[in-house]
Image (spheres, rainbow, N blue to C red):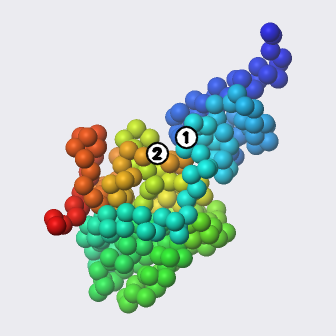
Amino acid sequence: MLQTAGAKARTLRLVRMQELINSKGPTQLGKVAEQLGVTEMTIRRDLASADSPLACLGGFVLEATLPSADEKYSLDEEIDHHTVRKRLACQRAAQWVEDGDSLFIDCGTTMIHFAEALPPGMTLSVVCYSMNIAAIVSRRPNTQLILLGGLYHPSSATFYSDEAVHYLGSLGVNKAFLSAGGADLQRGASCSNFHEVAVKQAAIRSAGQSFLVVDESKLGRVRPAFFSPLDVFSRIAVGGTPDAALRKQFKGLPLDIANPPMA
């Protein structure tokens, strides 16, 4: 059956979108529309059909086969998961902080342990966008706190706005400490909330060094929102005891594994 001109144009756009997502990972809807020279509504219509290999989720165009929105992230649900291993990773990463550092601290339950593990006597400047992190850092002496603002997202206790992302890019922190819901050798570092992507990427661009802080359960996992390849991180703190297969898979990356103490 012959395709109409409109159907041919849609097929061509889907091919171009697939190439774009294969190259850059999940991409903001507005940027996809700009690349293709059409409106955002046109892109939404293209992706609405059941035969589309791509989907629009949270304002991003991404592979329809990635973990879906059914896998919701909730700070309250995650807070008790893998606590010991998260704390181990954060205690190791905190050793990389030096007096006088300007830090970006990411959101999430892992980074709560990182904020608590910061050496108490140091003079620091801390940028964050999470209420939980701000509450901990605000109690520290000799620490300047910058809390980025915007629309509040209860699921992760974070704020987001385009203005905040722009401001973060102008700050020039020297060390960024980031968390991830997944760290995969091919698919990179990813998270569950799309609004966090631009903030994480701005922090990485702004920082002199970037560090990833995860527990072993995140290795080999992929979450819906890609934010960085793993090779941009100076070091990756991993709490727990990854098995031999995982260690081999991530060989060549700067993993710093914090093992639990022997019983």
Vertical relation: 4 (above or below) 50? above
Q: Residue at x 43, y 81 (%)?
A: 137
- Is there any visible trace of residue 167 in the rendered image? no
What SS does tag 2 mark?
loop
Q: Which residue is mark 1?
A: 66
- Give the left or right position of residue 191, taking residue 64 as reference: left
- Give the left or right position of residue 232, taking residue 59 as reference: left
* Relative depth, front residue between 258 and 123: 258
Q: Residues within 10 Å of mark 1 (few under 14, many from 20)?
A: some
The image quarter in which residue 119 lies: bottom left
Q: Which residue is mark 2?
A: 222
Q: x and y percent of residue 248 in the render?
A: 24, 40
Q: x and y percent of residue 160 in the render?
A: 62, 66
Vertical relation: 186 (above or below) 191? above
Q: Residue at x 47, y 76 (%)?
A: 133
Gap in angstroms between the C-alphas marked 1 and 2: 8 Å
- Give the left or right position of residue 2, taking residue 65 as reference: right
Q: Quadrant of the N terminus?
A: top right
Q: Residue at x 59, y 45 (%)?
A: 68
| Amino acid found under the numbered disc labelled 1 | Leu
Disc on the earlier residue, 1 or 2: 1
Q: Residues within 10 Å of mark 2 (few under 14, many from 20)?
A: many
| Amino acid found under the numbered disc labelled 2 | Val
- Is there any visible trace of residue 5 in the rendered image? yes
The image quarter in which residue 206 lies: bottom left
Farthest residue, direction front? 263
Whether tag 1 and tag 2 are in contact, CB under 8 A, the answer is yes
The image quarter in which residue 209 lies: bottom left
